[in-house]
Image (spheres, rainbow, N blue to C red):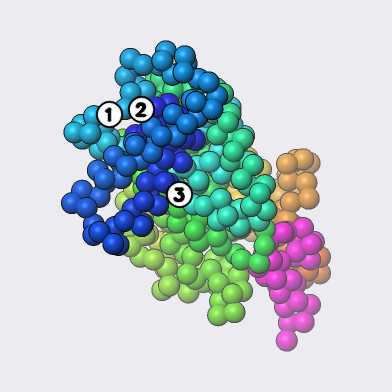
Amino acid sequence: MLARRFGDFATAEDAVQEALLDAAVQWPAQGLPDNPRGWLVQVAYRRMIELVRAETARRDREDRAARREGDDRRTAPAADEPPAGERDDTLILLFLCCHPTLSTASAIALTLRAVGGLSTAEIARAFLVPEATMAQRISRAKQRIRSSGLPFRMPDEGEREARLAALLHVLYLIFTEGHTASLGADLRRVDLAEEAIRLAHRMHALLPDDSEVAGLLALMLLTDARAAARTGPSGELVSLADQDRSRWDAAAIAEGTALVTRAMARGPVGPYQLQAAIAALHDEAPSAERTDWPQILALYQVLERLAGSPVVSLNRAVATAMVRGPAAGLAALAALDGDPRLAGHHRLDAARAHLHEMAGDREAAVTHYRAAAGRTTSVPEQRYLLMRAARLTHPG
């Protein structure tokens, strides 16, 4: 609300933080106000006025501030005007954080900070960078938005679709990093995965008729439903085929399946819906042996035509092996060897090792498992790949 009314995103954040500090001090001593949200809005508004006045005086911006008077977007609301304070600006803020002038890394950091409410230290820990580095990244993102002069409002209809695609991509990347951390000793970054799901829920509530928003939420729910079974007693990685399916979250699977079923029936069908449909087939299978691999392969083929990428092609190759045998899968993987986007990527070696193991070629499987272990930066994945190699080397 403050950012919308004053047009100053960074200062609005400072004002809200000061209001929350006031609440933390006053409420325990004086009791909870009758309208806590209204109390926060009014106190934050007063703090915003103080911050704006101080900044105006320091930088001699009286003339600029005067020129802004009369612009309804930048005028503070009356204290008895509840509609402005009650308006949900989450979607606008998400669009702002995912502005096309920002890099993907900056958009992710700013989204987690401004919308997710994670501290700079928490975001830095999640991506294994120093807190000072992350603070600079967030500060530069805020400055870029401020310099752009972008108004705090929904994008025009013409640019909304492209901006929405970028927004969904940022949420997808946040979830992906949370589900399988690319660096460090932990397999998951639980705070990131949960925050991505929370934001996707908000997106779906605000855009209930958008099929791809529903598809992304379904994909997150169906994927995260398996989280509890992905690690063993010692924290070791457990493959999908070996997981205890009784530990999967049945409620999340039911919610995700219902979402993607409704979304695909409503259309148009997009990449997130297709990925969610694949995840649903895995989740609904009573065992690894009874997985509907022909249907999964068909969905990957459609996904590859609609939104092809090296990772999609790699997954399609594995699905091909499950339907037509490891030799067919290895041939499909061989077609990816010349793709520079997969050069040196551990997943290509890991997939090739798995298919060689299926084919009974232990020596080749061990070679590729070890190569994959040497290329991944995730400690749990590295241990898992080396364990697979060791079991094939010493089967007893």
Is disc 1 in contact with disc 2, using a CB cutoff of under 8 Å?
yes
Image check: 306 left or right of 281? right
**CA neighbours of label 2 inside 10 A, class few (<14), some (14 to 19), many (20+):** some
Secondary structure category for the residue under label 2:
helix
Magenta part of the protein: which range?
368-396
Look at the image and say whether residue 25 sits in the magenta stretch: no
Residue carrying label 1: 77
Name the front one of labels 3 and 2: 2
Q: Residue at x 44, y 30 (%)?
A: 52
Q: Quadrant of the N terminus?
A: top left
Residue 245's image quarter?
A: bottom left
Secondary structure category for the residue under label 1:
loop
Residue carrying label 2: 5
Q: Reading the chain from its start, which is encountered first: label 3 or label 1?
A: 1
Name the front one of labels 3 and 1: 1
Q: Residue at x 48, y 39 (%)?
A: 168
- Total labels: the figure holds 3
Image check: 190 left or right of 378? left
Q: Is residue 126 visible?
A: yes
Tell me the amino acid under the disc marked 1. Answer: Pro
Q: Reading the chain from its start, which is encountered first: label 1 or label 2?
A: 2
Tell me the amino acid under the disc marked 2. Answer: Arg
**CA neighbours of label 3 inside 10 A, class few (<14), some (14 to 19), many (20+):** few
Image check: 36 left or right of 73? left
Q: Position of residue 91 (x, y in %)?
A: 38, 35
Residue carrying label 3: 117
